[in-house]
Image (cartoon, rainbow, N blue to C red):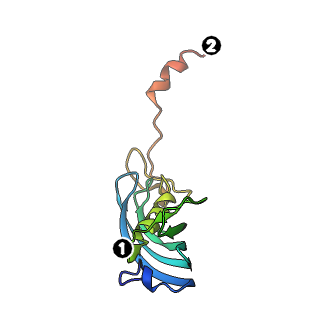
Amino acid sequence: MGNDGMTLRLAALPPGHSTHHGHLEFVVFDAAEEEEPHAVDVTAEVDKMGPRIHVRGHVEGHARSICHRCLETFERPLASDFVLTLQKTAEPADEDFVVLGDNMVEFDLAPHAREAVLLEEPIQLLCDPNCRGLCSQCGADLNQGRCGCRPQSDPRWAPLGDLRPSL
């Protein structure tokens, strides 16, 4: 790959199989519009066969996220894969492929690696599946223990109490 670690130099690709490594850092905004820095390593297994170049990419790294329940920052692992077929001509094919222009000398894998990671992003980010979150009354982190607030009844349910038959 090129200097940034994510660019395939097309003319320099050897025929047959080759392996390329790169690193990518980018920021994603989660569902709560919080910034999530991502740092990933990309391994691309490349097979150049005549006019076609098959790329199988594996992306692995970590993101720094904010838990949607307790608002604590935590690191979470990332792993994703992507597959591409590049070719110079626009002939019909049985598979999806990216058409390379006649004058293209490089192909950037970074957008494909980012997309693979984004497709795996969970909607709700939790530091732990059993995260108890924050108390809705005092804001205490319930993962640290009970806060002492008494549970409040929801006044919207009060009319149902009148429906009970009196004995």
Name the residue carrying label 2: 165
Name the residue carrying label 1: 103
**Disc 1 residue type (three-letter):** Asn
Mark 1 and mark 2 lie on one chain; the one further toward the N terminus is 1
How far across and how far down the image is residue 134, in percent? 43, 52
Q: Number of marks in the image?
A: 2
Question: Quick check: can you spot residue 80?
Answer: no
When asked about the image quadrant of residue 4, the answer is bottom left
Residue at 43%, 54% (x, y): give it. Answer: 68
Element type where label 1 sits in the image:
loop
**Disc 2 residue type (three-letter):** Pro
Residue at 50%, 56% (x, y): give it. Answer: 122
Mark 1, mark 2: which one is toward the viewer?
1
Horizontal side of residue 153 vs 165, given as left or right: left
Residue at 49%, 18% (x, y): give it. Answer: 159
The disc placed on residue 3 is none
How far across and how far down the image is residue 132, in percent? 51, 53
In this rendered view, identify the residue nearer to me: 156 or 35: 35
How far across and how far down the image is residue 77, in percent? 51, 70
Q: Is residue 59 above or below residue 133?
A: below
